[in-house]
Image: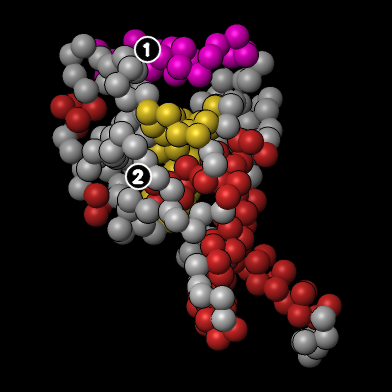
Amino acid sequence: MTLPTTLTYPSNLLSNLSSVQIVDLRPVLPTNPKYTWESLNGFRNLNDLTTIVFHHDALSKASTRGYDNRTLATRIAQSHINTKKNRSEGDAGFPYHAWIRNGVIHITNNLEALTYGVASNNGYTVHICVSGDYANHDTLTDQDRNALYAAYFLYKQWLPKFRQLMGHKELSPTACPGYDMAKVRKDIASIELEMSLNNTPNTALARIFGFHTRYQDLYNKAVNAKDPNQAAAQAKLLDIIQVAIDKGYYVPQ
């Protein structure tokens, strides 16, 4: 599926995320003169895309400070076209579907494009990258996190068979993305909980029902050792338990 030129966030996304700017760089980024990602690898079926993968571009913020967003994205795309690591004639172009820098989400490839984001795992994955080297030099700022989480919800809504969020290093031996995926998952679970509560009518029963639904989802993840979000779900439930203890609603046995 080719993403439209004008993208909108889910209607119930929190305001600090829905205000993140989206810029479409697809028309201006360089591509290999011999092929595009689509002509090279064909078109993926939207129903096959189950996993969003978070990355960093491994370029320290200090080393790229002199470039504006579009210029740096162009340089990244050109470097992948010039590399011979994956193909003798170079990659097709920019390797991620979305790229984040300076608090802006840049759309860099169509969803159906099979790019080279994670070796042997590109048929079912959508790649979202935040600029910086978080394994060695940088840390995610609040601006980085807001844009990263906004991009997650922006893309998740297009994936009818979405199943999981992964960090690059959870699928392949690498330091990427360098930032703490356990914290990322915990933050996203908290955002999803708030969204689910905000999405219900403002009545007591509706809010209780919404909380029950979210609690059940967290519980199912927390007790499933194979669920990649198990740790985040357990942390969130422990937070809820502590609130109940503090208010005297629950006394541990």
Magenta region, residue range: 63-90
Q: Who is closer to the viewer here, 29 or 169?
A: 29
Q: Which residue is mark 1?
A: 78
Instruction: Classify residue 230 as left or right of residue 6.
Output: right
Disc on res. 15: none
Mark 1 crowdedness (10 Å alpha carbons): few <14, some 14-19, many ≥20:
many
Residue 107: x %, y % from top left = 39, 31
60 or 22: nearer the eye?
22
In the image, is residue 48 above or below residue 6?
A: below
Query: Which of the 4 image quadrants contains residue 118?
Result: top left
The three-letter code of the residue at mark 2 reads Thr
Residue at x 32%, y 25% (from the top left corner): 26
Kindly indicate the quadrant of the structure image that contains residue 79: top left
Residue 111: name its quadrant.
top left
Question: In the rendered structure, which amino acid carries the disc numbered 1?
Answer: Gln
Q: Earlier in the sequence, mark 1 or mark 2?
A: 1
Q: Give me the residue at 50% from left, 19% from top.
A: 69
User: Is residue 159 toward the left or the right of residue 253 in the image?
Assistant: left
Label 2 packing within 10 angstroms: few (<14), some (14-19), many (20+): many
